[in-house]
């Protein structure tokens, strides 16, 4: 039973049929992620939030037992888990007319479009879900005007695109489209 009103793909299908702008955004000055968070990223955050709810429930039980300092520690640990889950979902690449921002778990890096020499897709060994294990895959590389080794923006085996080659291609095309439109 198709439920097109519940999917995010309906808007893209309607825009493609109408011949809309390939970048698909009305306000280019707003920071936007050109792709949806992947199932591995969302699933990991959901597990962290589930674990945080158990820790908060244990904090309630500990507080009712009369040990307020221990309950405070549990609440602090749960708050740290919730913040980590939110940062995990937010991490990725976002673009705007000003440039490209790579948001990580602990820090963010912004590069203006004028400082980017090229953005290209390359076949190379990539890290599997960010772990030390490498597999052969695709990576979207950013080459800076200052030179040096290219930075990897997204890969076909990260938490957003593992097992979703078409989504990686669409995201890479969208980021390359933003670069072509705003350099």
Image (cartoon, rainbow, N blue to C red):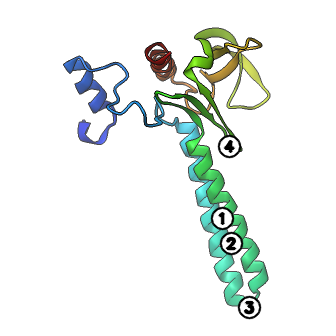
Image point (51%, 24%), residue name: 164
Residue indicated by mark 1:
79
Quadrant in the picture for residue 80: bottom right
- Local crowd at mark 4 within 10 Å, few (<14), some, or many (≥20)? some
Is there any visible trace of residue 1 in the rendered image? no
Residue 109 in percent (x, y) is at: 66, 34
- Answer yes or no: do the residues labelled 4 and 3 have beta carbons within 8 Å? no
- Local crowd at mark 3 within 10 Å, few (<14), some, or many (≥20)? few
Q: Mark 1 against mark 3, which lies toward the viewer?
A: 1
Image point (71%, 82%), residue name: 62
- Answer yes or no: do the residues labelled 3 and 2 have beta carbons within 8 Å? no
Tell me the SS state at disc 1: helix
Quadrant in the picture for residue 156: top right
Image point (45%, 16%), residue name: 177
Question: How far is disc 1 from disc 2 in space, using C-alphas?
Answer: 6 Å
- Local crowd at mark 1 within 10 Å, few (<14), some, or many (≥20)? some
Residue indicated by mark 2:
75
The numbered disc on residue 105 is 4
Residue 111 in percent (x, y) is at: 62, 26
**45 to 157, vertically: above or below:** below
Residue indicated by mark 3:
66
- Answer yes or no: do the residues labelled 1 and 2 have beta carbons within 8 Å? yes
Question: How far is disc 1 from disc 4 in space, using C-alphas?
Answer: 16 Å
- Answer yes or no: do the residues labelled 1 and 3 have beta carbons within 8 Å? no
Q: Earlier in the sequence, mark 4 or mark 2?
A: 2
Q: Residue furthest toward the bottom?
A: 66
Tell me the SS state at disc 4: loop
Q: Earlier in the sequence, mark 3 or mark 2?
A: 3
Q: Earlier in the sequence, mark 1 or mark 3?
A: 3
**175 to 80, vertically: above or below:** above
């Amino acid at each position: 039973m198709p439920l097109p009103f519940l999917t995010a793909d309906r808007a893209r299908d309607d825009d493609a049929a109408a011949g809309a702008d390939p970048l698909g955004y009305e306000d280019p000055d707003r920071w936007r992620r050109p792709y949806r968070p992947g199932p591995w990223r969302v699933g990991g955050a959901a597990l962290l939030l589930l674990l945080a709810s158990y820790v908060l429930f244990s904090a309630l039980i500990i507080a009712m037992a009369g040990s307020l300092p221990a309950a405070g520690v549990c609440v602090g640990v749960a708050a740290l888990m919730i913040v980590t889950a939110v940062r995990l979902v937010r991490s990725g690449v976002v673009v705007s007319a000003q440039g490209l921002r790579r948001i990580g778990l602990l820090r963010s890096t912004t590069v203006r479009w004028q400082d980017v020499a090229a953005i290209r897709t390359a076949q190379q060994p990539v890290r599997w879900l960010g772990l030390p294990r490498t597999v052969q895959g695709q990576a979207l590389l950013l080459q800076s005007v200052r030179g040096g080794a290219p930075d990897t923006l997204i890969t076909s085996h990260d938490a957003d695109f593992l097992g979703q080659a078409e989504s990686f291609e669409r995201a890479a095309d969208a980021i390359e489209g933003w670069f072509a439109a705003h350099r």
